[in-house]
């Protein structure tokens, strides 16, 4: 591994964190449902006249929002459904979120992850055991942190970067793991035309409906199953 100034290695992560903080301060009142409602006709007109450019611009903006953890990711997902329908809107949402999340992952891995992973690998005792458990259950853990709503998207990008997860595993688990949430938000966004007509706001409580919540809970259990099985087998082997 080449010797690089620690500050240089940390610079991308520092920039991401700084922009995220500035975003919370200056953009939290800009990227809102009211802003989408106020500009909906202009957005539709631009989409109808410039569809390929609209797709590229939308995905690019989503990458920036996800990559710098800016406020407005939920509004962006709703906008993807509003502009492009559930399909292909969900794909554009997932693409932007995955690329943006990968940027954070790479910044974390380059800045701290490689050294941290190497130190954990070379450690003794409980630290080495923790690293071994993580490595043996990477796929399950990666899908779990994507599926469990309590884990923020930003943290779900940082943690794998700090633990030396291979890039391909991160990308695949991110793209597939965000499908349930992306699909629900995009489908809600696809119905915003009627919501706007009534002067209402979208009901995001749909996530708690049994037809949505129970399948997601099942996916969480499925992702956790290999970890549970290994833990039970480990105890029996003692």
Image: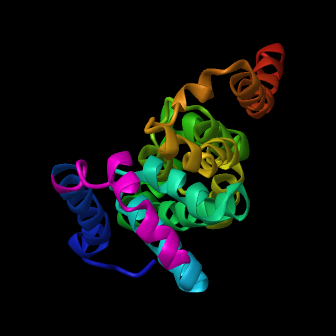
The foreground one among 151 and 113 is 151
234 above or below 188?
A: above
Q: Is residue 29 magenta?
A: yes
The foreground one among 107 and 117 is 107
Residue 232 lies, in percent from the top left, at: 79, 18
Residue at the spot 54% in from the left edge and 57% down from the top edge:
164
13 above or below 154?
A: below
Residue 42 lies, in percent from the top left, at: 42, 70
Residue 101 lies, in percent from the top left, at: 50, 60
Residue at the spot 62% in from the left edge and 48% down from the top edge:
182
State how the image is colored: rainbow
Using residue 44 as the reference point, say whether residue 167 is left or right of it. Answer: right
86 above or below 13?
A: above
Residue 15 lies, in percent from the top left, at: 24, 67
> Which quadrant is home to the C terminus?
top right
The foreground one among 34 and 217 is 34
The foreground one among 222 and 50 is 50
Name the dominant secondary structure of the magenta segment.
helix
Magenta stretch, residue numbers: 26-47
Looking at the image, the residue that sits furthest to the front is 197
Instruction: Examine the image and state in which quarter residue 55 appears.
Output: bottom right
Q: Is residue 31 magenta?
A: yes
Let me know if residue 188 appears in the view: yes
Let me know if residue 106 appears in the view: no
- How many marks do you count on the picture? 0
Using residue 212 as the reference point, say whether residue 152 is left or right of it. Answer: left
Instruction: Examine the image and state in which quarter residue 199 appears.
Output: top left
Using residue 24 as the reference point, say whether residue 77 is left or right of it. Answer: right
222 above or below 40?
A: above
């Amino acid at each position: 591994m080449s010797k690089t100034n620690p500050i240089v290695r940390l610079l991308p992560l520092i920039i991401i964190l700084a922009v995220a903080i500035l975003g919370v301060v200056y953009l939290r009142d800009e990227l809102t449902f009211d802003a989408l409602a106020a500009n909906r006709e202009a957005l539709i007109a631009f989409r109808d006249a410039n569809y390929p450019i609209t797709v590229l611009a939308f995905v690019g903006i989503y990458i920036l929002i996800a990559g710098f953890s800016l406020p407005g990711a939920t509004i962006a997902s709703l906008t993807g459904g509003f502009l492009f329908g559930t399909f292909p809107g969900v794909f554009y949402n997932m693409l932007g979120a995955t690329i943006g999340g990968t940027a954070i992952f790479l910044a974390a891995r380059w800045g701290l992850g490689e050294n941290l992973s190497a130190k954990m690998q070379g450690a003794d005792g409980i630290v080495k055991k923790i690293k071994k458990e993580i490595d043996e259950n990477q796929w399950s853990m990666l899908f779990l942190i994507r599926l469990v709503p309590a884990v923020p998207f930003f943290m779900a990008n940082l943690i794998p970067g700090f633990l030396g997860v291979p890039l391909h595993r991160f990308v695949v688990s991110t793209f597939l793991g965000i499908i349930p949430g992306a699909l629900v938000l995009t489908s809600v966004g696809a119905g915003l035309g009627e919501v706007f007509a009534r002067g209402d706001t979208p009901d995001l409580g749909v996530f708690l409906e049994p037809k949505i919540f129970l399948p997601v809970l099942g996916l969480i259990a499925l992702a956790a199953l290999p970890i549970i099985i290994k833990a039970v087998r480990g105890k029996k082997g003692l």
